[in-house]
Image: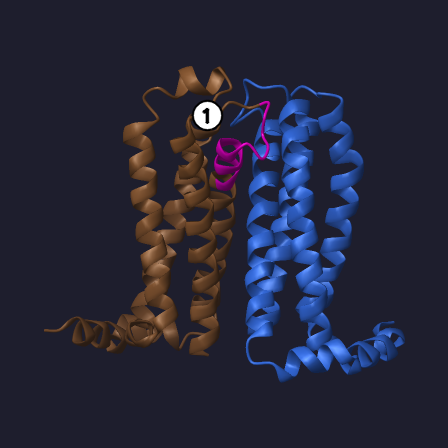
Chain colours: A brown, B blue
Amino acid sequence: MTLYQICQALQDSDFGTSIRESIWTFPAIETVHVLGLAVSVGILVMLDLRLVGAGFRQVPAADIMHKLKRWYLSGFIAMFLSGALLFWSEAEKCYRSPTFRIKLIFLALAGLNALFFEIKYVPTMRTWDTNGITPTGAKLVGWASLICWLGVIGFGRWTAYGMK
Amino acid sequence: MIHAFLPFFRWADHTAVAVWIRDSTWIFALLEVFHLFGLTLLLGTLVVVNLRLFGWGLAGHRLSAVASDALPFTIWGMIATIGSGALLFVSEAMKCYGSAPFFVKMGLLALALLFTFTFHRYLTKKDAPPSAITKFAACLCLTLWFGVGLAGRAIAFF
């Protein structure tokens, strides 16, 4: 079974069809997706802005990361689950959508970027962040994260627009 | 009462900007993207400040510090959403005129702005310790803003 056939089977499944053809379910899932995004990425952006030195000077990056963790993680879970359901209902359309592919690339890059930050800079974060000297690498991680998430949001929105 | 605004909606629908956006295939989509960028910044920062009002999240930091750090970005978020939203509106003003969720959204937006920049701002500025009042204010603020978001989504669907 090719990837295309899997996508087609998902979209044609009873479950996928019932979401796609529903009056309330599809809009409700899309709303959860957008609001989950605002909570999760909205908080993550604050961390990035602090890393690049654009703001949030009074709150250490470690506090944004750890004390708000349960909130942005909840947002991410809501966004991923709702995103999976949206994909299920329109998998074949997504497969053919170039903007959706670009979105996934940005999403993967955002994930790798976060992983790199976690391994390379988080263990020593308390030291460098409280001293007020953000390592150049961590600043670049902040910029990369901002760009990746703008890409995910931008191409995500464009995917929905292009498929209507 | 809504009828009184009809000439305004007609005028908006016929402006050169509205025609320009309607005639373009990608400007509308681009404006929607900006609308979403702004919304992310706006809601994300508001969630953090309101969690703090509740005594959650960044509880170890002074409320006024969290709020003053967040405020510029909340305002940038507002500028992006309202700016792009105004352009989205003129491009389909007559569609909005016939849309009940649009009027609900504008009503909630007015209340949300009013509340955020008056009583809500007053509480964060004076470092009010978590109490029934700050918790109520936090719930009200988030309900109003998420209500704006929900009603906004509803415009596209109904």
In the displayed image of the protein, which residue is found farthest to the front? A136
With respect to residue A106, does A130 lie above or below? above
With respect to residue A81, does B139 lie above or below? above
Is residue A92 visible in this depiction of the protein? yes
Residue A48 is inside the magenta segment:
yes
Q: Quadrant of residue A82?
A: bottom left
Residue B92 is inside the magenta segment:
no
Q: Residue at x 39, y 46 (%)?
A: A76
Q: Amino acid at mark 1?
A: Thr
What is the chain identity of the residue bearing mark 1?
A: A
With respect to residue B127, does B22 lie above or below? below
- Pointer 1 local density, CA inside 10 Å: few below 14, some 14–19, many at least 20: many
Residue position for label 1: A134
Magenta segment range? A45-58
Q: Residue at x 71, y 82 (%)?
A: B19
User: Does residue B37 appear left or right of residue A29 in this picture?
Assistant: right
On-image quarter of the N terminus of chain A: bottom left
Q: Residue at x 28, y 76 (%)?
A: A92
Q: Residue at x 37, y 61 (%)?
A: A103
Q: Position of residue B28 (x, y in %)?
A: 60, 73
